[in-house]
Amino acid sequence: MAISADFTIDYTAKTVTHTSGTTVYTVLAFFQYLAATFASSSQMDDDYAFVSDTPTVYRWVNGWAFGAPTVDYKFLSGGGITSSDSNYIWSNLYSIGSQ
């Protein structure tokens, strides 16, 4: 299943929420998905959502966030994510067993 089918972007609320599937993606794949989505010409009027500080450390920017911060990260592994306001830090994400 494609990552775009598992995560939903809400441009009004500025959230990205896991909405279906059980696949666990790398944070790098999540970053690449968001980068490709926001780089498309139809999205040029939207604030960019997610940046990479290092190859394994990522950060929400411009007021963007997980839609369900206590659930969405469970479908990502292999990196750390900080919220826009630095109130949430998801570090060394990994999964043991199935979701």
Image: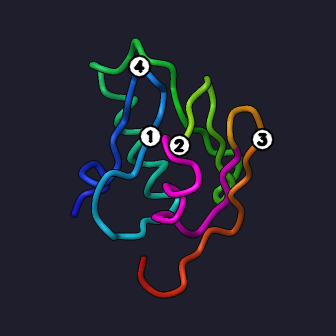
- Mark 1 vs mark 4, CA separation in Å: 11 Å
Where, quadrant-wise, is the C terminus in this rendering? Answer: bottom left
Label 3: state its secondary structure. loop
Residue on which disc 1 sits: 16
Residue on which disc 3 sits: 87
Residue 64 is situated, as x and y percent measured from the top left of the image, at 56, 30
Residue 78 is situated, as x and y percent measured from the top left of the image, at 58, 69
Please name the amino acid that badge 2 sits on.
Phe
- Mark 4 vs mark 2, CA separation in Å: 13 Å
Please name the amino acid that badge 1 sits on.
Val
Residue 55 is situated, as x and y percent measured from the top left of the image, at 64, 57
Query: Looking at the image, do the residues carrying marks 1 and 4 touch, with CB atoms under 8 Å apart?
Result: no
Please name the amino acid that badge 4 sits on.
Thr
Which contiguous range is marked in magenta? 67-82
The residue drawn where x is 58% and y is 55% is 70
The residue drawn where x is 63% and y is 30% is 61
Residue on which disc 4 sits: 12
- Mark 3 vs mark 4, CA separation in Å: 21 Å
Mark 1 and mark 2 lie on one chain; the one further toward the N terminus is 1
The residue drawn where x is 63% and y is 63% is 79
The one of 3 and 99 positioned closer to us in this rendering: 99
In this view, 37 is above or below 5: above
- Mark 3 vs mark 2, CA separation in Å: 12 Å
Label 4: state its secondary structure. loop
The residue drawn where x is 49% and y is 55% is 72
Crowding around mark 1 (Cα neighbors within 10 Å: few <14, some 14 to 19, many 20+) is many
Residue on which disc 2 sits: 66
Label 1: state its secondary structure. strand
Please name the amino acid that badge 3 sits on.
Asn
Query: Looking at the image, do the residues carrying marks 3 and 4 touch, with CB atoms under 8 Å apart?
Result: no
